[in-house]
Image: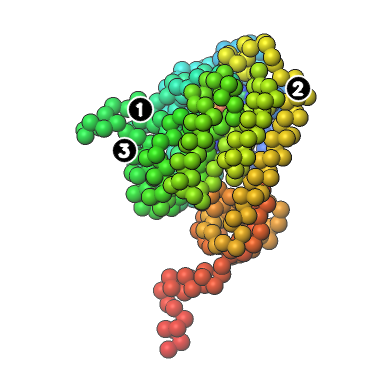
Amino acid sequence: MKRYHLTTFGCQMNEHDSERMKGMLESLGYVEAPERDEAELILFNTCSIREAADSRFLTHLGEARKLKRERSEVVVGVGGCWAQSLKEEVFERFPFVDVAFGPGQVHMLAEFLTSDSLSAQGYFEFEGFTGHLPSRRTRPFQGWLQISVGCNCACSYCIVPSTRGREVSRPAGELVEEVAAMAADGVREVTLLGQNVNSYGRDLPRGEDGQRASFAGLLHKLDAVDGIERIRYTSPHPKDMREDVIRAHAELASVCEHIHLPLQSGSSRILKAMRRTYDRSRYLDRVAMIREHLPDVAISTDIIVGFPGESEEDFEQTLEVVEQVGYDSAFTFVFSPRRGTEAATITEDLVPHPVKSARMERLVELVQREARARSQRFVGRTLEVLVEGTSRNDPERLRGRTSHNKVVNFTGLAAPGELTDVRIDSATSQTLAGEELLRDRVTRALRASPNPPARAAR
Ligand code: 5AD
Ligand code: SF4
């Protein structure tokens, strides 16, 4: 039996693609090796979103080269966005790589492995959804659903449109079937994935009713699938965040109380240079519409610091928006020039490194202060938590997630995959802490028991 080892970098789409890669390899008879040095097939699913992602991966690739020197029969495969962005250059620069493939060519890995070809092979077309491949889920109760691939935006800093191609949506009927199959398999929480989920369906033909498929419509269809208790999605683009989607959060029980709304910058001037197609006030209007319909929803965001030309004033406008919105959490990034992108060609008004670092520090401090203040609203409340496992810091405690996407560490008895009620006792900027309401749990267990003790005693 051949063994494989797969290391995944990057976003949730890559996590999803890796689950599909694993499913595909296992259907070919491969088994997963616990360590890289025990595998005959060493695979990487790569990311190139920022320079740091590249360098982290290259350290791992160096280790694969060493292992291949020791055991020449080892096959090294590199998939994902880094591979796509370099294409054939991968083989010139890293001749020990046997196979390289982009995110649209994961299925070709199977073809490569079952062919007799010993020469290096590269597959870089944009075709095929990894969502069509068999999957091996990391957690049996959580599943990813790839609703579209690719991105039609032209954000000037972003490498993704070139690594994942134009946007292509999957038909809703196919997605409903996939989610129903997941539910039958024990999945309770599904996360819909796309580079810009709320432009879903614009490329699909109109239905018999003459209507175009929409993201809100898809949420309605998936909410109706029995057994799916929670629906999340990532990422929407603020320009396409429409009222129908916000209403779906309010109307549909399974759609979680969390919206990720990437800001990138609070300065209209910088947003224009980033080609985000919204300005500060349009972004804030969307936030106001969200808050009007969903006063308690958690809003998170992505922010880039130090985009070329960002002045102190521009940066202060970002701080202002952060303060005004009051994010529940934010991912903050220092601008990193990426090969092939428009922003990487800008040579004027670059922000010096120490300035970027200082701004980042100020931003993170504000983000944490806001997040800490926001999370205090949960203290004293009882929230439904999907249990994910044991707490990272304390094996005696459990860890789960609320609908607001807050991590909760708590004492209790529930098993992974269960939804249970937790009373929240304290909150930091990142996590909540509390105690499972065991009384309710015992009552529920007794009610569900085929032989309730009261009857047995009679
Ligand atoms: N530099 C820094 N951050 C970036 N992101 C995307 N491209 C870059 C880049 N070149 C950030 C954006 C995006 C998130 C996934 O990564 O904030 O929303
Ligand atoms: Fe995901 Fe973007 Fe990284 Fe590709 S480059 S893996 S799309 S984060």
Instruction: For marks 3 and 2, give the CA distance.
Output: 49 Å
Residue situated in front as seen by the camera: 452 or 252: 252
Q: Which of the two marks, 2 or 1, is nearer to us in this view? A: 2
Taking the spot 38% from the left edge, 29% from the top edge, the residue there is 169
Query: In the rendered structure, which amino acid carries the disc numbered 1?
Result: Arg
Decide if residue 335 is in sight here: no
Name the spot of residue 131 as percent of width and height, x first: 43, 34
Q: Tell me the amino acid under the disc marked 3.
A: Gly
Place residue 84 in its image quadrant: top right
Above or below 348: residue 423: below
Q: Is residue 116 left or right of residue 65?
A: left
* Residue that sits furthest to the left in the current view: 208
Display colour scheme: rainbow
Q: Is residue 344 above or below residue 249?
A: above
Dividing the image into four equal quarters, which quarter contains ligand 2?
top right
Tag 2: residue type?
His
Mark 3 surroundings: few (<14), some (14-19) or many (≥20) residues within 10 A: few
* Residue 256 position (above or below residue 37): below
Q: CA distance from mark 1 to mark 3?
A: 15 Å
Q: Which residue is mark 1?
A: 202
Task: Return the residue at label 3.
Answer: 173
In three-dimensional space, the C-alpha distance between marks 2 and 1, rounded to whole angstroms, equals 41 Å
Query: Horizontal placement of 252 versus 124: left or right?
Result: left
Q: Find residue 270 and report its image quarter.
A: top right
Residue indicated by mark 2: 353
